Image: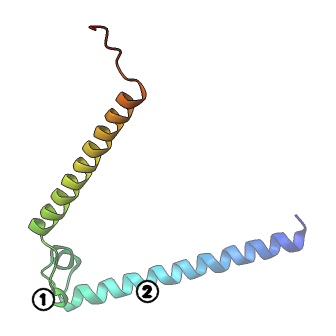
Amino acid sequence: MSPDREAEASEDMLESIDELKERLSSMKRMMEERKQAGAGTKDLFQGHATSLHGTNMIDGNFLSIVFGGSLVVILSVSIYAFYNLYHAVLKKFPSQHTEL
């Protein structure tokens, strides 16, 4: 690499590091403001924050129904596929009847 390119690369890296530091400090400032306002992150993650009141959050029962339905669909498709595979193999390789 030429010295000019190395200088540009290190300059770009320093700029990106400065941007990241600035973002980090602004995030820390925002978190401190939120903590002082009384809306902590614990309330936000547990669904008790004032900003979340009145919203319809997906609860555990709904998720259980959705995942249970998905499981039933996956199992039924698997059984259907193996049933068709079994009959295709029987059709391709029929058993020889020797009793006559």
Residue 8: x %, y % from top left: 79, 76
Question: Of helix, strand and loop, which one carries label 1?
Answer: loop
Q: In the depicted view, which residue is nearer to us: 44 or 53?
A: 53
At a point 38% along the width and 35% down the height, the residue shown is: 88
Q: x, y (%) of residue 83? A: 28, 39
Question: For the residue labelled by badge 2, is the local secondary structure a helix, a strand or a loop?
Answer: helix
- Label 2: few (<14), some (14–19) or many (≥20) C-alpha neighbours in 10 Å: few
Tag shown at residue 53: 1
- Disc 2 marks a residue whose amino acid type is Ser
Left or right: 14 in relation to 91: right
Tell me the amino acid under the disc marked 1: His
Q: Position of residue 92 (x, y in %)?
A: 42, 29
Q: Give the quadrant of the N terminus.
A: bottom right
Quarter of the view holding residue 20: bottom right
Left or right, residue 96 beside residue 39: right
In the rendered view of the protein, which quadrant contains the C terminus?
top left
Kindly identify which residue carries mark 2. Answer: 26
Residue furthest out toward the right:
2
Residue at mark 2 to residue at mark 1: CA–CA distance: 27 Å
